Amino acid sequence: MLKTHFCGIEFQNPLLLAAGVMGSTASSLNWILESGAGGVVTKSFSVNPNKGYKNPTTAEVEGGIINAIGLSSPGVLNFKSELKLIERNNDKGHKNIIIGSIYGSNPEEFTYIINEIESLVDMIELNVSCPHAMSGCGAAIGQDPDLTYEIVKASKNARESNTPIIAKLTPNVTDLTQIAKSAERAGADGLTLINSVGPGMKIDINARTPILSNKFGGMSGPVIKPIAIRCVYDTYANCNIPIIGVGGISNHEDVVEFLYAGASAVQIGTSIMYQGIEIFSIIAKKLKSFMGENGFENINEMIGYANKE
């Protein structure tokens, strides 16, 4: 009942680990997979190692968190050793779906990483949307339709097989559908919507200084869910490639909203900090009950329901 298909790949359920949360090591990724997630997205990594910003890098705010990690990365050659240690099948004999999240500052860097990891992952998510990235990566690309097109096109051409290429887009633009259409024209197999909102800021009133070392950071958590839902809804109505929804999911009702808006799967991140990795199995169980109570036999029947006239 909970199976869903995205870019031709079958997931046992639509609940995936979002990039940036517990995705730095094979052990943590295996742990998430064992907990009931339908798949995992690694932490975004780059060609060369990047220390990112110094601590503090996260600050709790009402409705979520603000973070500025700075896209810290061990570098692709180091991270390949972790990818090789991820369990490819679970204890029920189902294939574990691994999505590699990558970033770079130009098409050549994306191409290089894809050539290095393509055989080790099932999909590749292009992070062109981080609002607090270092070295000209992130939202600087995802806010420009031409740069987005260029990166997606180069990434598609770099593949030696049919590994799906997904573009993760930022909501911090005037018209997200314009960027989404550009990614689609370039050949993106799917989209992930959205990355964190902002940047935002929090000030320590006692120290009288910004809490984050970078001063500004991207907002995530339940507070951004309405924005994410709207982005998925609009993009589903204007594009013809599948969508993974992400942003503030903490229960099965949130998942249903994303599915109704047009997502084929969802990613969960910030809520793991509060509910633990059990969140995947808990939501899966409640989602299955909801579907049975409301006459849905499969996930596909729910996708885009709110977009139907």
Image: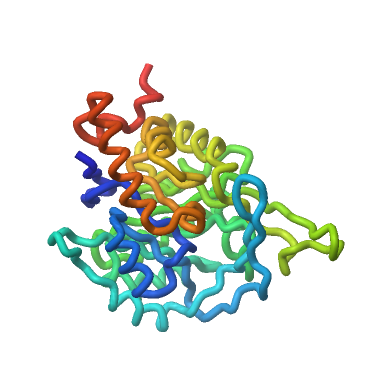
**Which quadrant holds the N terminus?**
top left
For residue 293, side relative to residue 279 (left or right) = left
Task: Measuring from the top left, give residue 203's x and y in whole percent.
Answer: 79, 57
Task: Measuring from the top left, give residue 229's x and y in whole percent.
Answer: 49, 36
**Which quadrant holds the C terminus?**
top left
Q: Residue 254 appears in which quarter of the rendering?
A: top left
| Residue at x-position 52% and y-position 44% | 179
Q: How many marks?
A: 0
Task: Please say if 306 is above or below 246.
Answer: above
Residue sitting nearer the eye, 99 or 297:
297
Q: From this viewpoint, is residue 157 visible?
A: no
For residue 157, side relative to residue 64 (left or right) = left
Q: Residue 137 appears in which quarter of the rendering?
A: bottom right
Task: Please say if 17 is above or below 119.
Answer: above
Task: Measuring from the top left, give residue 282's x and y in whole percent.
Answer: 34, 47
Task: Measuring from the top left, give residue 28's x and y in whole percent.
Answer: 38, 70
View extreme (left): residue: 93
| Residue at x-position 67% and y-position 73% | 55
| Residue at x-position 38% and y-position 46% | 266
Q: From this viewpoint, is residue 225 visible?
A: yes
